Every structure is written in C-alpha cells, then in structure tokens.
Image: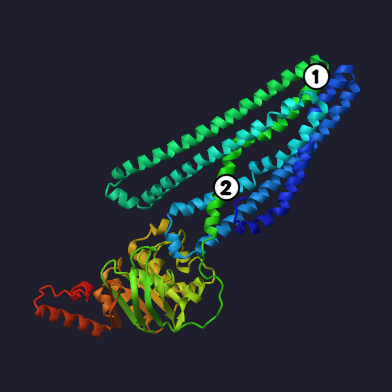
C-alpha cells in the first residue's frame, strides 16, 4: 500500500468485513482445489491398480459433492467481489468529488481538465485492483505453501526439482513489475496529453470549424497521437514479453517435473498416480506466480493511481466547517491592501489595492483589459485568497467563512456563461430542491426572460443542451443573471453582464441594477455607457491598483479635468500615464 493513504482508511474500513469474508471463502475454495489431484492419485493407485470399482464409485460421488460446494463457494465469492466493488466505487467517487470541490480555485486552475478527469479513471483502477482478479490472486498466493507441502508428501523425489522453479518465477515477476511499471507510467502521461488535446478541440469545435483550425491542429495532434501509440507499443511489447516468458517457464516446469518423475517411477521411487497428482498440484502453485507476471501491470497502475489520488487528498482545502452563524450581511465590502499573483514567483496581478464598496449602491469597475478587474471580482467572491491584505464583508474577513456561506451572501456572474446539462429550471435552481417555482419565476421575470421561456414548448423544462448550446448567447446570459438572483444575496458581482445582450435588454438590465441596489450591493465590471448611467460609484483599475475611486460624477469630472490639463500642456492625446487614457477609453 502506498504511504500516506489515511484518506483511504475510512473506505477500507467499510469493506473490511467483506474482504475478511472473501479470504474465508477463498480458504475453502483452495482446500477444495486439492480434491481433483487427490482423486486422480487414488484412482491410479487404488482403482486402476486393484480394479476396485466400488472405490471408484465412492470417489466419484465424493468429488461430485465437493464440486457442488466449490461452485456454491465461488458464486458467493463472486457476489462478495461485486458488493465490494460497488462500495468502493461509490466511496471513492464521492470522496474524490467532495475533495475536488473543496479545493481552492487556484488549485483547480493549476491542472488541466484531463488531469482531473484522469483521477476518476484512477478510482476505477483502484476498484478493479482491490475488488477484482488482482486481489483474488494475492489471496490465493499464500495457499501455494499448502500445495507445496502436499507435493512433498505424495511426490518427494520431484518436490525439490519443482521448488527450484519458484524463485525464478518470483524474480521474473519482480523484473516484470519494475519494467512494466515504468512503461505504464510513460504511456499514462502520453495518454493524458492526448486527452487534453482532444478535450480542447472538442470544447472549441465551433471555432475550430469556423476558422479551419483543424489543419493546423492535425499536425500537432498527429505527433501526440503517434507518441501515445509508441508508448503503448513499448509497454505492450514489454508486458507481452514477460507474459510469454512466464508461459514458457510454466511449460518448462511441467516438462522437467515429468522427466524427473519418469526417472523416479523407473527407479520405483514414485507411482504414476503420484506423478500426475504432483503435476496438477504444481500447476496450482505455479499458476498464481505466472499470473503475477502478467498482472504486475495492474499492481503498477494501482500504485500510480494511489499516488496521484493521495497527492490530491493532501492538497489544502477551503474552510469547510462553519464556526459562526451571522445574520444576512448588509453587503458592505472592502478590500484592504490586496496583493495577488497567480504564480509564487510571478509578477503581482494586483498590488497593494484598496477599495471600498458601500452597501445598497451600484459600483462600476472600469479599466484596461488585463488590468486585474476579473481577478479582483474573484477575490471579492472568495474564489481566490490574496497573498497579502484582506477582503472584508461588513467588517469581517471573508476567509473565516465557508464556501457555502459566501455563496449565499455573494452572487457572481462570470464573463463566461456556463450552463449545466439539464433543464432551464434545474440550471436556475442550481440543481437544488429547496428552490421554489415562485422564486425561479420571480428571478426570471426580473431579467425579462419569463415570458420567453413560457413560449418554449417545454417551458422551464426545456433542455439547455451541452453547456447551454441549445440556447442563444443572450438567453444564457440572462439565465446566468437570474440564477444569482434566486437566493437574494447581499452582494451581486457582475463581470461584463451585458456582453451578449442587445440594446433593449441592456437598458432593462440598467433599470434592474437600480432596483436591486435597494436591497443589495451591486458591483459591475463593464465599459457600457448605458450601465454607467445607473452607477453610483466608479472605481478605475489600472497598473495593479485603484487609481481613482468615488462617486461617479466626481470621478468622471476628475478624468475630464486631467485630460484638459494635459491637452493644455501640449499632449494632443490627452493621455495620462496614471489614468491610462482619455475618458472614452473607460467607456465614459
């Protein structure tokens, strides 16, 4: 077992009784495996040698009864394996899903989608190893000692010859494990690169087709696919080579044992029945070791999967336990001396930034592209945590609150409107059962989309398609806005909320902002002149910090005065390095 797998202990504890039962039934299955060799031994030594038909009848009846029990035991063991696999599958998938969504957003963004998808394949590997043939193989291995002892009892002259082959099988399995594991790891990494490219191409299929990017992507994908095939072939060649070597070694063992057994029979040291029984028992002993050579890929994959899962389980999570239960906040947000960078050794995206968002007002964040506006929104939402400084909600540091609490208090509409697979109703309710139809209709009515949805043949039951592909961009935009209005949060963050709306819808949204600000704090990232008309406070972001902040009219007046001053000084562009350009650049 891989070290540091405490996270797996709870799951292992739930299946421990079933695993003990599996070992118990496997014990009797292996005991019954002695029946056939002993039957053959008795038939040759007693029935054939003495012509005792009555003994043969008794032996056949006893073997038939033993085979019936063997069948029942194997059936029970198969059912147990299925139950263990089901519990493992549910336990691992549930634990991994909860862990992933408890990770900070920066951790989730630091790895590709194919990496996170690959973790669920790792859970399949763990399940198939712990509750599959590899586990039964490990359970059967110790019983080889029992078969070896029996070989010594009934065929001692050839027992030592047979025993000399076991270290060779163990050595072959060990070498196989090391070499196949290395090849499997290279193959897995290559497959992950391939899956990442495929995911990107499928996710951007519309753009790829529209711009005929497939011709350029084909060259890149061919190289990655070729590498995947090459790594798969290397792993296959190595694995097949060891499997074939194990098969030849098994056959060689039978040849050698039979040859030495024949000499022992000639010297009257062994009976024919003992030789045949010993051969059958030797196959029972060698079979697990021979399978171990081929199954080592499973164990190598299991170890790699456990290593990756353990790595994720050790990642720090967001706060998950609520320590306080405050009332609904008023929505007064404040950022104090925030510094944030995406990489520990990278340049800060925001540096020593401070801004105050008064409650029950519409605030607009404006600034050049790449200035850090969206990053600031994610910091205010608690999706990112600053390197230095803090974000306050009603004077309380938001780092003390859980994701669930912040989601109730702070609504967020990102630039990209993503819909989940399902109906319109399910998307607006966030797949929650505690959201009533009245709340959904009220939210949709506020953004002016209720009547439009009602005109659909399936109404709120209309399927949105993959990522909302069945709906237009404008409808998706309004649905994403309605989704955050359902819970009536104290703070509403909008990142370019009108990018996909027409002029009429944008005017309606401007009026909605003024209405919402009566009960919530509204923070909008936009350069829309229309939305600027509903703004109470304007905050200009540039050069990693807030350069101007205050009531809208005062900020616009300051920008205009600065532009005039620079024009008078001979700067025809009216461009201020501290402000970043003329007032038009800010949408004013």
- The crowd level at tag 1 (other Cα within 10 Å; few <14, some 14-19, many 20+) is some
Q: Which mark is residue 152?
A: none
Residue 155 shows in this picture: no
Q: Residue at x 44, y 75 (%)?
A: 410
Specify the color scheme.
rainbow
Q: Residue at x 51, y 66 (%)?
A: 317
Q: Answer with mark 2 or mark 1, whichever residue precedes in sequence.
A: 1
Residues under labels 2 and 1: Cα distance? 45 Å
Q: Position of residue 171 (x, y in %)?
A: 62, 34
Q: Position of residue 100 (x, y in %)?
A: 51, 60
Q: Position of residue 50 (x, y in %)?
A: 90, 17
Asked whether, in this view, residue 238 is left or right of residue 169, the answer is left
- The crowd level at tag 2 (other Cα within 10 Å; few <14, some 14-19, many 20+) is some
* Mark 2 vs 1: CB contact within 8 A: no
Asked whether, in this view, residue 105 is left or right of residue 53, the answer is left
Q: Is residue 286 above or below residue 1?
A: above
In front here: 392 or 438? 392
Q: Residue at x 35, y 52 (%)?
A: 204
Q: Is residue 556 above or below residue 382?
A: below
Residue lying farthest to the top in this orientation: 266
In front here: 130 or 303? 303
Label 2 belongs to which residue? Answer: 303
Residue 220 shows in this picture: yes
What is the quadrant of the C terminus in the image?
bottom left
Q: Position of residue 418 (x, y in %)?
A: 40, 62
Label 1 belongs to which residue? Answer: 272
């Amino acid at each position: 077992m891989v070290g540091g797998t405490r996270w797996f202990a709870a799951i292992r504890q739930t299946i421990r009784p079933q695993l003990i039962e599996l070992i118990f039934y496997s014990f009797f299955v292996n005991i019954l495996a002695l029946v056939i060799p002993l039957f053959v031994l008795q038939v040759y030594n007693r029935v054939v040698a003495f012509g005792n038909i009555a003994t043969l009848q008794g032996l056949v009846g006893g073997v038939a009864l033993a085979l019936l029990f063997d069948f029942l035991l194997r059936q029970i063991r198969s059912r147990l394996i299925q139950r263990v696999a089901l519990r493992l599958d549910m336990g691992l998938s549930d634990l991994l899903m909860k862990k992933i969504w408890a990770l900070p957003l920066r951790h989730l963004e630091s790895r590709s989608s194919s990496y996170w998808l690959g973790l669920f394949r790792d859970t399949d590997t763990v399940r198939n190893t712990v509750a599959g043939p590899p586990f039964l193989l490990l359970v059967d291995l110790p019983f080889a000692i029992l078969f070896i002892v029996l070989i010594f009892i009934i065929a001692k002259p050839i027992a030592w010859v047979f025993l000399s082959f076991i270290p060779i099988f163990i050595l072959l399995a060990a070498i196989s494990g090391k070499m196949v594991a290395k090849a499997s790891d290279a193959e897995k990494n290559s497959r992950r690169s391939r899956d990442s490219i495929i995911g990107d191409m499928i996710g951007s299929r519309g753009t790829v087709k529209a711009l005929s990017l497939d011709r350029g992507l084909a060259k890149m994908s061919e190289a990655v696919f070729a590498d995947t095939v090459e790594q798969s072939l290397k792993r296959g060649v190595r694995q097949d080579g060891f499997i074939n070597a194990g098969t030849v070694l098994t056959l060689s063992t039978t040849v050698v044992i039979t040859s030495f057994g024949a000499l022992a029979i000639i010297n009257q040291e062994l009976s024919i029945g003992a030789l045949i029984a010993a051969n059958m028992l030797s196959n029972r002993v060698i079979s697990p070791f021979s399978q171990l050579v081929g199954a080592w890929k499973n164990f190598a994959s299991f170890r790699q999967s456990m290593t990756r899962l353990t790595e994720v389980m050790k990642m720090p999570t967001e706060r998950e336990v609520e320590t306080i239960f405050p009332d609904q906040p008023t929505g007064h947000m404040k950022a104090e001396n925030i510094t944030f960078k995406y990489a520990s050794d990278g340049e800060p995206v925001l540096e020593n930034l401070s801004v105050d968002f008064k409650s029950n007002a519409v605030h607009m964040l404006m600034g050049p592209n790449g200035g850090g506006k969206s990053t600031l929104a994610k910091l205010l939402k608690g999706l990112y945590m600053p390197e230095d400084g803090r974000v306050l909600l009603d004077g309380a540091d938001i780092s003390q609150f859980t994701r669930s609490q912040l989601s109730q208090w702070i609504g967020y509409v990102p630039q990209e409107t993503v819909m989940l697979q399902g109906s319109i109703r399910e998307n607006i309710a966030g797949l929650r059962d505690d959201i009533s139809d009245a709340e959904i209709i009220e939210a949709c009515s506020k953004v002016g989309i209720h009547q439009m949805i009602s005109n659909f043949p399936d109404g709120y039951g209309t399927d949105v398609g993959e990522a909302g592909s069945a709906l237009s961009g404008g409808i998706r935009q309004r649905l994403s806005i309605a989704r955050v209005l359902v819970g009536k949060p104290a703070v509403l963050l909008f990142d370019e909320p009108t990018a996909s709306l027409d002029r009429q819808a944008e005017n309606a949204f401007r009026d909605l902002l003024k209405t919402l600000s009566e009960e919530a704090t509204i923070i909008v990232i936009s350069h829309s002149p229309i939305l600027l008309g509903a703004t109470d406070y304007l905050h200009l972001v540039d050069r990693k910090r807030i350069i101007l902040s205050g009531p809208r009219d005062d900020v616009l007046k300051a920008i205009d005065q600065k532009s005039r001053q620079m024009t008078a000084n001979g700067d025809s562009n009216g461009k201020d390095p501290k402000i970043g350009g003329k007032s038009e650049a800010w949408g004013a």
